[in-house]
């Protein structure tokens, strides 16, 4: 009964959408109908006289103009390329067991089987219609960002217009086979209402209007064509607004009918599987923001992100009592066993994730190469810390901060100097942690930020780079904070860490006056230096494929994970990197990877967890005592030069 009720509601709303299309057609034909009446009246001698002659000419011209405009709008709506989600196509030869599972599920639900299967780097699953002529045949491989991890024929279809089943790739690696079947049941059940002719026609009309609005928004045209596009866009938006309520209710009816139909399939297991959906969502978000993002910024992309989700969630189950028992499921058959080559598909989805969430090139190259998890500490963490430390010392050089303290000069802050200093150390001109500590620790009557003039001057390129950072923040995140990737990847603080309560602002903006003027000055110059490097970087589009994807390639990243870091956050990261470099070069500490927190410092094989508050105390308050005490406790010598990247 529930299935029929949901389907009836969806069909009623679909008919309402189609009636809007019919009304638009009637309005376009109305002047032509009036012109026919006037012409017929004149030929029969009923409408005679100069007034009627003028009316016939005016109405006929108006009818021709309206018909021409309506024809152009109809052509654009019919031919405009609807948006397609970036996915990795999975050919049947690459996953025969997965296709068999989906077919069996469709048979149990008594609905048409999806036409093909694709993966997306997100924790969600849905059906997507790709029957538009611009997309080629159903489920075309060329319509995907990466043309699959295998080749072969498409899945056998009961109907020629069956949609494509898009599955979140983290589900395949974390979920067991039974859990995946339970999660996909309501999704596959949606192919039943999708096959209803009225619903399919209404969806095509709405997608065409949406595509027409997007096509008319292109500004790269001559003024005359731009004016025509503005008119087409106005008409398409007008009809789209009229369809909005009916289309939303139609989709709700389709979802209700599909959910009701899926109740008969593994209902008890679906409850357990929904818990795994939430857990996979949290692990994927954490992995992207804490682990993958630092690698992407270094020009490396982790090639096994989906496998990393399993490691991250296993670590979470070890730390969190709420997740206890989830790791015991790992003994069952994982859903990724349904793939013939899970490693190749994981690599393809990992590269797509890097493009969507960071804007990297479509193919590997000298400045954009994959990295395995075993190589992550050395290839990403170590390089990141040493590169940040080198940038920090370059900015200090620009500000005129001396490289090595004078042992004969009075100490300006912190603990007293060594009464018997090592002359070889003080004679060194290499970069040291002590240089950073001394500069960020103001003495009594320390200079203000104004005593350091802007060492970068009025460089127009730097001004544009800084403005671009602010503009990028506004366009992607507005003034309210971050948005989730693919629409719902969770809300993060400015550091990308869930639960971070620090305010989000423009790069360089601070809500409160800086307690440490030296820190504020250094942070500002560091932000400009980062903007300079970003402005000089090669644009991602240089490495993209020649084939045009069905989504806007120039808008990458489509789903930024977090806003640009503020200048104070940049300074905190760089000081932390300098401390880690000193620890590695003096006490033999090693870089490590924490699946939940990202790059981490290991001292004697033990993860250091108390460094962040000590660095914040130095950066925000100019108090180096906690950090110096920590350095003494571990035996780290801040006056010893470190190796930079």
Image: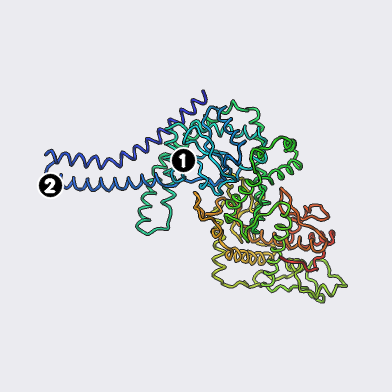
Left/right of residue 514 with respect to residue 108 in the rendered view = right
Above or below, comparing residue 185 to residue 521 in the picture: above
The residue that appears at 46% across and 29% down in the rendered structure is 9
**Residue nearest the observer in this picture, 275 or 51:** 275
Q: Earlier in the sequence, mark 1 or mark 2?
A: 2
**Residue nearest the observer in this picture, 570 or 535:** 535
Left/right of residue 613 with respect to residue 236 in the rendered view = right
**Residue nearest the observer in this picture, 387 or 323:** 387
Left/right of residue 633 with respect to residue 171 in the rendered view = right
Residue holding disc 2: 50
Mark seen at residue 147:
none
Pinpoint residue 46: horizontal percent, then vertical percent.
13, 38
The residue that appears at 36% across and 59% down in the rendered structure is 223
Secondary structure state at the residue bearing disc 2: helix
Tell me the mark number nearer the camera, choosing from 1 and 2.
1
Task: Report if the CB atoms under discs 1 and 2 are less than 8 Å apart.
Answer: no
Above or below, comparing residue 225 to residue 264 in the picture: below
- Is residue 481 among what the camera can see? no
Mark seen at residue 131:
1
Pinpoint residue 390: horizontal percent, then vertical percent.
70, 66
The residue that appears at 66% across and 41% down in the rendered structure is 173
**Pointer 2: residues within 10 angstroms few (<14), some, or many (20+)?**
few
Above or below, comparing residue 199 to residue 529 in the picture: above
Pinpoint residue 272: horizontal percent, then vertical percent.
67, 32
Outermost residue toward the right in this view: 420
Q: CA distance from mark 1 to mark 2?
A: 53 Å
**Pointer 1: residues within 10 angstroms few (<14), some, or many (20+)?**
some
- Is residue 618 among what the camera can see? yes
Q: What is the quadrant of residue 35 in the picture?
A: top left
């Amino acid at each position: 009964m529930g299935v029929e009720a949901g389907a009836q509601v969806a069909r009623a709303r679909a008919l309402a959408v189609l009636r809007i299309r019919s009304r638009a057609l009637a309005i376009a034909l109305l002047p032509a109908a009036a012109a026919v009446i006037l012409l017929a009246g004149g030929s029969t001698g009923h409408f005679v006289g100069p007034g009627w002659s003028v009316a016939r000419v005016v109405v006929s011209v108006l009818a021709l103009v309206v018909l021409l405009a309506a024809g152009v709008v109809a052509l654009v709506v019919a031919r405009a390329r609807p948006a397609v989600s970036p996915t990795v196509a999975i050919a049947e030869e690459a996953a025969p067991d997965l296709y068999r599972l989906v077919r069996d599920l469709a048979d149990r639900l008594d609905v048409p089987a999806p036409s093909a299967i694709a993966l997306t780097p997100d924790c969600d699953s849905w059906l997507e219609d790709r029957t538009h002529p611009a997309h080629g045949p159903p489920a075309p491989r060329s319509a995907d960002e990466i043309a699959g991890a295998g080749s072969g024929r498409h899945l056998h279809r009961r109907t020629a217009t069956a949609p494509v089943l898009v599955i979140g790739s983290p589900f395949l690696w974390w979920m067991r086979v039974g859990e995946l079947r339970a999660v996909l049941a309501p999704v596959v059940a949606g192919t039943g209402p999708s096959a209803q002719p009225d619903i399919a026609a209404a969806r095509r009309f709405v997608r065409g209007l949406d595509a027409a609005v997007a096509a008319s928004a292109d500004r790269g045209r001559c003024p005359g064509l731009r004016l025509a596009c503005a008119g087409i866009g106005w008409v398409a938006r007008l009809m789209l607004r009229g369809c909005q309520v009916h289309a939303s209710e139609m989709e709700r009816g389709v979802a209700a009918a599909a959910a009701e139909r899926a109740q008969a399939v593994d209902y008890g297991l679906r409850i357990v599987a929904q818990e795994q959906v939430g857990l996979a969502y949290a692990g994927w978000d954490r992995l992207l923001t804490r682990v993958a993002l630092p690698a992407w910024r270094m020009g490396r992309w982790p090639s096994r992100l989906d496998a990393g989700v399993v490691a991250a969630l296993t670590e979470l189950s070890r730390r969190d009592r709420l997740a206890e028992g989830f790791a015991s499921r790992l003994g069952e058959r994982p859903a990724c066993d349904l793939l013939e080559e899970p490693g190749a598909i994981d690599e393809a989805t990992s590269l797509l994730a890097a493009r969507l969430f960071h804007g990297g090139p479509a193919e590997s190259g000298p400045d954009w190469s994959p990295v395995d998890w075993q190589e992550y500490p050395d290839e990403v963490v170590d390089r990141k810390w040493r590169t940040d430390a080198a940038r920090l010392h370059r900015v200090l050089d620009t500000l005129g901060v001396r490289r090595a303290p004078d042992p004969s000069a009075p100490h300006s802050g912190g603990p007293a100097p060594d009464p018997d200093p090592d002359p070889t150390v003080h004679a060194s001109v290499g970069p040291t942690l002590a240089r950073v500590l001394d500069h960020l620790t103001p003495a009594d009557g320390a200079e203000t930020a104004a005593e350091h003039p802007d060492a970068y001057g009025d460089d127009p390129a730097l001004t544009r780079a800084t403005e671009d950072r602010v503009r990028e923040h506004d366009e992607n995140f507005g003034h309210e904070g971050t948005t989730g990737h693919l629409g719902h990847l969770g809300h993060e603080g400015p550091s990308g860490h869930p639960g971070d309560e620090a305010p989000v602002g423009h790069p360089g903006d601070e809500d409160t006056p800086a307690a440490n003027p030296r820190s504020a000055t250094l942070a500002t110059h560091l932000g400009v230096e980062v903007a300079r490097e970003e402005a000089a970087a090669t644009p991602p589009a240089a490495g993209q494929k020649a084939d045009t994807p069905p989504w806007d390639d120039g808008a990458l990243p489509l789903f930024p994970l977090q806003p640009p870091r503020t200048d104070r956050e940049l300074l905190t990261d760089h000081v932390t990197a300098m401390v880690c470099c000193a620890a590695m070069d003096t006490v033999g500490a090693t870089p490590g990877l924490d699946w939940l927190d990202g790059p981490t410092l290991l001292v004697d094989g033990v993860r250091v967890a108390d460094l962040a508050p000590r660095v914040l105390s130095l950066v925000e308050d100019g108090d180096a005592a906690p950090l110096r005490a920590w350095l003494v406790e571990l035996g780290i010598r801040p006056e010893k030069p470190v190796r930079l990247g």
